Amino acid sequence: MTLRIELLPAGYGDAILLAYGDGATPQHHILIDAGQAKTAQSVLDRLATLRAGGGVIDLFVVTHIDNDHIGGALKLLSDPAAAAMIQAIWFNGYVHLDKAVGLLGPIQGEKLTQQIVELGLNWNSGWPHPVQPGVGGPVVITQPTTRELPGGATALVLSPTPAKLAQLRVKWDEVIAAAGLRPDQDATEEPSVVAPGLLGGTLADLADQRTSNDAAEANGSSISFVFEYGGKRVLFGADAHPDVLTAGFAQLTEKPYRLDACKLPHHGSKGNVTAGLIEALDCPLWLVSSNGVRFRHPADTALPRVVLKGARGDRLPCIAWNYRSDRCKAFTSSFPPDRSRYRSLEPSGEGLVVDL
């Protein structure tokens, strides 16, 4: 059985392609987000290669409406060849935040929803409380919920909760404007900011710094899940809030919860990668999806927590990067892997492929 994770070059966002199936050539593919609008071409190029081999996207998961996750999705669905590859989509639009609102109301203010409706995509199929014929209910859970995926895989969905979606509903207009989702407004890209070096101190000093949990409404609405196939498990944390993830794992009987890899929530933000979350997991491989620009991800405090809290016995945690970014160079220079008891997996160019 094959399970391959590709962290595509998506700027400071996420664009993740899963390939899995029997034998050396995976038959099934899941795309999780599509990065920024300005990095969408890398996703389109990868899909073109997949399409040339007869591949399709069994499921496209648009985790939430931040521009660094959804900007590329708008361009992907505007490309007829790429859109034709999508067999099903998970995405919570306004109609899922308040399913009593019909498709002819405020929902027309979302570009992505308009594209989904116009393309007739299989939208949130199988989720309870469908909003109308042909459109499933919100991807939302009150406790960890397992959903069947094509090819014998499963998704243990951990986020979002109803409370997190309710918080987003209040901020919806403001958030979709910021994400460039209005029909009369193009997606905007924030200016680049050079990421400075790390703060001073030891790994323990940085890991122990007091930080507040992420409270951004859009991040809290993230669809986050553990993908499982052939006995392998990977957490795709999107930008989910740490309180929701840790509460979800606390409801499971397996403690700490075994994973084979974890895509760090919110690109390694200090408000999402908490000591409590790391301690809830038994995981050897921690994936960083960010070029480190603009938001200085991963944060000074996040990776020290992974290094110190992610070790299990003699097994050292491995941090894998999809960019050899300034943040990567700063961390590995300040805390060399061979002296700081962790391993670092760095790409030769942009993007990273991991076979589990």
Image: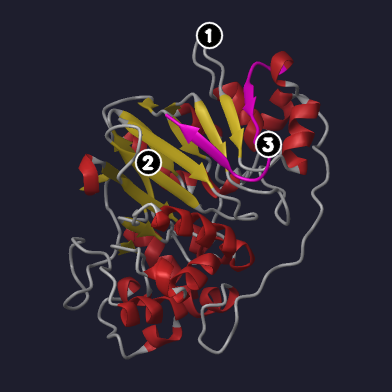
Q: Which residue type carries mark 1?
A: Asp
Estimate the x, y position of residue 199 in percent, counting from the top left.
81, 37
Separation of marks 3 and 1 at Cα, in angstroms:
28 Å
Estimate the x, y position of residue 227 in percent, counting from the top left.
34, 41
Estimate the x, y position of residue 329 in percent, counting from the top left.
77, 35
Local packing at callout 1 (Cα closer than 10 Å; few below 14, some 14-19, many 20+) is few
Residue 349 picture quarter:
top right
Residue at (33, 78) in percent of width and height: 119
Q: Which residue type carries mark 3?
A: Ser
Q: Looking at the picture, does residue 337 appear above or below residue 20?
A: above
What residue sits right under mark 3 in the picture?
Answer: 348
Residue at (30, 60) in percent of width and height: 139
Q: Which residues are magenta?
A: 340-356
Residue 107 picture quarter:
bottom left
Residue 198 picture quarter:
top right
What residue sits right under mark 1 in the picture?
Answer: 314
Separation of marks 3 and 2 at Cα, in angstroms:
37 Å
**Residue 238, can we see it?**
no
Q: Which quadrant of the rendered structure holds the C terminus?
A: top left
